[in-house]
Image (cartoon, grey):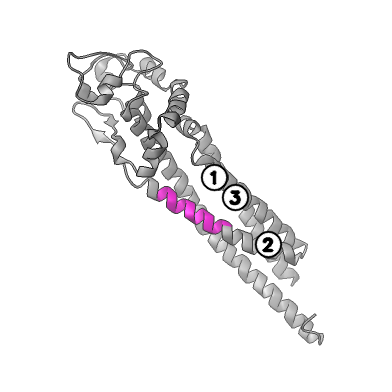
């Protein structure tokens, strides 16, 4: 019984360690400028990681101090959290399975189309109320100013591998036919009505293409890339949690069996 309880405690200590990558993935998302502006995935991930940590600590204490109530709480609560984590993993995969950049003539960087992304993600940015808040947050960052510092010549900029957010928000779409002056200042063509985004572009450094659909698409492309990285961490953690949880269940069953056998030898199997 003591050995089994020690195993249960050790298993729960492993779960405590497994909560760290979940919490870490959420914290990493909060450090990314786009995720910090949207605030969609990071807090559910952090909260789930903290709950896993709390439940694992309860199981750890219950295992080493032989508190059956805490062990039962651990087994039930951890099962629920594993199911929730699995649901989150599947959800992230489903909303990030669509959407990719498109090559444009004479450009190395890609451009992005809002309609390529999942409906759930699109709804997060299509509302004017939601987008106004996100746009204000994005425009306060230095991502577009950094392009002006890095690229002086047009060909250098056209050959650059800029990230999706910079491609969508800091310059007009290539099909608009604008003439390059610097990465965030372009001369308008005579007819710029090829796309609604062409009319949205402004050389005002606080406006640029932050109101464009291309900016929304670039944001979703960035979110997709970062969420997929976080999802890989969550998948690995989920598999490890399932294995450790099953080990804990086996140890708990063995502990109860040992206790029943001991009581039977003493002639009182039911007390």
User: Residue 73, which numbered label?
Assistant: 2
Going 47% across and 29% down the picture, which residue do you hit?
33
Viewer-nearest of labels 3 and 2?
2
Where does label 3 land, which residue?
Answer: 19
Label 3 neighbour load within 10 Å: few <14, some 14-19, many 20+: many
Q: CA distance from mark 3 to mark 2?
A: 17 Å
Q: Closest to the observer: 201 or 237?
A: 201
Q: Eyeballing the image, is 246 above or below 48? A: below
| Image-quadrant location for residue 128 | top left
Placement of the N terminus among the 4 image quadrants: bottom right
Q: What secondary structure is found at the residue carrying circle 3?
A: helix
User: Where does the image place residue 10, in percent across and percent down from the top left?
Assistant: 67, 60
Q: What residue is rendered at 37% in x and 38% in y?
A: 122
Could you tell me if residue 63 is visible in this image?
no
Label 2–label 1 contact, CB within 8 A: no
Residue positioned 32% across, 45% down in the render: 98
Residue 258 spot, x, y in % from top left: 72, 78
Residue denoted by label 1? 44
* Residue 130 spot, x, y in % from top left: 45, 31
Disc 2, SS: helix
Characterize the local packing of mark 1: few (<14), some (14-19) or many (20 or more) Cα atoms within 10 angstroms: some
Residue 131 covered by magenta stretch:
no
Part of the protein shown in magenta: 81-93
Q: Identify the mark nearer the N-term, 3 or 2.
A: 3
Examine the residues drawn in magenta and state their main secondary structure: helix
Q: Nearer the viewer, residue 152 or 178?
A: 178
């Amino acid at each position: 019984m003591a050995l089994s309880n020690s195993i249960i405690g050790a298993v729960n200590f492993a779960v405590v360690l497994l909560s760290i990558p979940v919490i870490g993935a959420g914290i990493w998302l909060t450090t990314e400028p786009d995720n910090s502006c949207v605030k969609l995935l990071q807090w559910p991930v952090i909260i789930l990681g903290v709950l896993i940590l709390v439940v694992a600590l309860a199981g750890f204490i219950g295992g080493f101090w032989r508190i059956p109530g805490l062990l039962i709480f651990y087994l039930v609560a951890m099962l629920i959290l594993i199911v929730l984590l699995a649901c989150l993993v599947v959800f992230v995969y489903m909303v990030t399975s669509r959407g990719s950049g498109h090559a444009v003539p004479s450009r190395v960087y890609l451009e992005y189309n809002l309609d390529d992304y999942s409906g759930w993600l699109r709804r997060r940015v299509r509302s004017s109320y939601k987008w106004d808040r996100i746009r204000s947050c994005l425009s306060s960052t230095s991502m577009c100013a950094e392009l002006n510092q890095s690229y002086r010549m047009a060909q250098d900029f056209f050959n650059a591998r800029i990230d999706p957010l910079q491609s969508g928000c800091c310059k007009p779409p290539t099909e608009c036919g604008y003439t390059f002056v610097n990465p965030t200042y372009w001369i308008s063509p005579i007819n710029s009505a090829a796309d609604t985004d062409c009319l949205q572009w402004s050389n005002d450094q606080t406006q640029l293409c932050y109101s464009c659909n291309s900016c929304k698409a670039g944001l979703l492309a960035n979110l997709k890339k970062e969420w997929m990285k976080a999802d890989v961490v969550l998948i690995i953690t989920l598999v490890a949690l399932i294995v450790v949880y099953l080990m804990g269940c086996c140890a708990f069953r063995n502990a109860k069996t040992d206790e029943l056998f001991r009581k039977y030898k003493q002639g009182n199997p039911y007390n």
